[in-house]
Amino acid sequence: MDTFAEYILEEKDLASKMEIVYYLAKRNKIFFDKSVIFKTELVRLFLNYSKIEVDSNLVLTASLLCNVKKIDNAQDIESIHNYAKRGAEYLSTIGFNKRFCKICEEVNRYSNSNPRERESDILELVDQFGGMLLDRPERIGFKPDEALVLLEYRNLKDKYNRYMETFIDFVKFMEQINVSELVNMTAIKRLVKIHNETDDVISFIKEVVYSYEPKIDKLVEKQKEKISKEMFNNLENPNRPLFSEETAKKIMNHLGEGVGEKVEE
């Protein structure tokens, strides 16, 4: 008989994966709520945007399962520090290999697991950023630009994450996509709104998979085409400056060292 790990990894459809974990959670009393779906959708969008050379199926599965031992609104510091490690230990009992469990354990850095897996860096960024976007009992959710600043300069300050710059570019890209013609509602803010207004996990899965994803994927491709067209038009323009003003100043200042005055900033 196949293990649970083999069963869910062989399932490539993300909506079906979510449903599988939902029923596992009901049976085994593991953590699985709307925030898990929310963060997994952010992972999906980030992977589609960045084209990072990782196994997307594995990363999305890890995103659904890396918080299985998390305690909702935990106040106990030990529980906060240990849930990822305990979750990895649990996942090993249902058939996941050592590397998959390590990826899930490294969703945060409390276990001091090192060296870190590439996939773990993706999970860490989305877990930290996505968590800040959602309301908590002690605070309302941050706006995407605010969460991005906190991610870089507070949460992961002095910590190396190999995909930080790519993730920053991704969030900025998604913030350029307006999903509504009537109000200013960007792609990430729309996902937050759906999360906040949906009552239960199954309803949220259906809303994300069958309504949000088809629309947002089309808008993402449209935005990429727009950016590519603008870049091409700039290259085709014979009157465009060869260098940006900032680059030109740097070149002139460098050439002028020791032989003349520097260009004024």
Image (cartoon, rainbow, N blue to C red):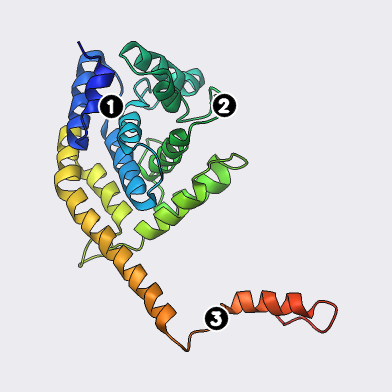
At mark 1, the secondary structure is loop
Residue under numbered circle 3:
242
- Classify residue 128 by image quadrant: top left
Q: Is residue 234 visible?
A: yes
Whole-angstrom CA distance, mark 2 to mark 3, is 45 Å
Q: Is residue 24 above or below residue 176?
A: above
Q: Residues within 10 Å of mark 1 (few under 14, many from 20)?
A: many
At mark 2, the secondary structure is loop
Residue under numbered circle 1:
32
Q: Left or right of 218: which side holds 88? A: right
Q: Left or right of 201: which side holds 89? A: right
The tag on residue 114 is: 2
Dot 2 or dot 3: first in sequence order is 2
For this rendering, which residue is in front, 240 or 245?
240
| Residue 19 on image: x %, y % | 18, 29
Amino acid tagged 3: Leu
Residue at the (47%, 23%) spot, across then down:
80
Q: Is residue 191 above or below residue 73?
A: below
| Residue 155 on image: x %, y % | 53, 40
Residue at the (46%, 19%) spot, across then down:
85
Dot 1 or dot 2: first in sequence order is 1
Whole-angstrom CA distance, mark 1 to mark 2, is 27 Å
- Classify residue 254 by image quadrant: bottom right
The tag on residue 264 is: none
Q: Is residue 136 above or below residue 115?
A: below
Q: Is residue 11 above or below residue 216?
A: above
Closest to the camera, between mark 2 and mark 3, is: 3
Amino acid tagged 1: Phe
Q: Residues within 10 Å of mark 2 (few under 14, many from 20)?
A: few
Residue at the (22%, 19%) spot, across then down:
24
Q: Look at the image and tell me in which quarter the N terminus lies.
A: top left
